[in-house]
Image: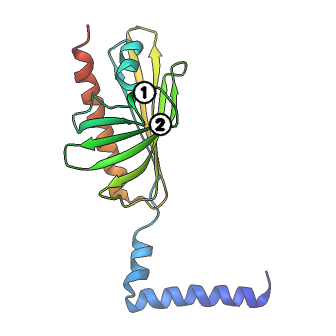
Amino acid sequence: MSQPRILNLIDDVQSMIDSCLKGDTEQKQSISSPPSAATVTETIILNYKIDNVWNIIKDCTFEFSSIVKSCEILPDKSATASVGTSRKLNYNDGTAQMIQINEISALQKKISYSMISSEPSVSYTSATHSIKLLEITCPGNQTFVEYKSTFSNDASLQVIQDSRFKKKEAFKDMEFALSSIK
């Protein structure tokens, strides 16, 4: 590194320290709010066969979810299992989000989707979510569910924590929906 470049770096660090000591609010915020983890993973074992669990998630309509009021498949219902199609999720609180389907794998028992818009808007740039199922063979008739979200690095700790709670609620909703299947 050249000497002028090192001196510029030292000046920048000194300026940051000086502004923190003087109470510069913007600098304090950037120091007091370190980047947060951008991935949230929650898991559960459901006491249901993998095919039953797969049937309630594979269409990416979230009919099992108590917070989803309705889901519209776009461009039309004939595209239910098509990668690249969209879903408009309308939530009970009035929020409407558009998601795009990235993956539907019957072989891997996995779905993946990205949020492409939200009304009202969200505080982060992007999020990709996936739900993956694994069959538990011993003792059998159980399914391991992994629900994972990867957020852009501008997601706050509150967003991460909210995602964690919503996944736990989704698991409860899955169990409830599955309890009616014989």
Left or right side of 52 for 148: right
Q: Tell me the element at label 2.
A: loop
Left or right side of 119 for 109: right
Left or right side of 170 for 133: right
Q: Which of the 4 image quarters holds residue 168? A: top left
Q: Position of residue 126 (x, y in %)?
A: 46, 53
Q: Which residue is mark 1?
A: 80
Q: Which mark is residue 39?
A: none
Q: Nearer the viewer, residue 146 or 127?
A: 127
Q: Position of residue 17 (x, y in %)?
A: 50, 86
Mark 1: give few (<14), some (14-19) or many (20+) Cα within 10 Å: some
Label 1 near label 2: C-beta < 8 Å? yes
Against 137, residue 62 (above or below) is below
Disc nearer the start of the sequence (2/1): 1
Query: Which residue occupies 29% across, 57% down?
Result: 120
User: Looking at the picture, which amino acid does disc 1 mark?
Assistant: Thr
Q: Position of residue 135 (x, y in %)?
A: 46, 15
Q: Which residue is mark 2?
A: 85
**Extreme residue toward the left, this view:** 93
Q: Nearer the viewer, residue 101 or 123?
A: 101
Query: Which residue occupies 32% across, 57% down?
Result: 158
Q: Quadrant of the N terminus?
A: bottom right
User: Looking at the picture, which amino acid does disc 2 mark?
Assistant: Thr
Q: Nearer the viewer, residue 141 or 138?
A: 141
Query: Which residue occupies 73% across, 86% down?
Result: 5
Q: Nearer the viewer, residue 11 or 78?
A: 78
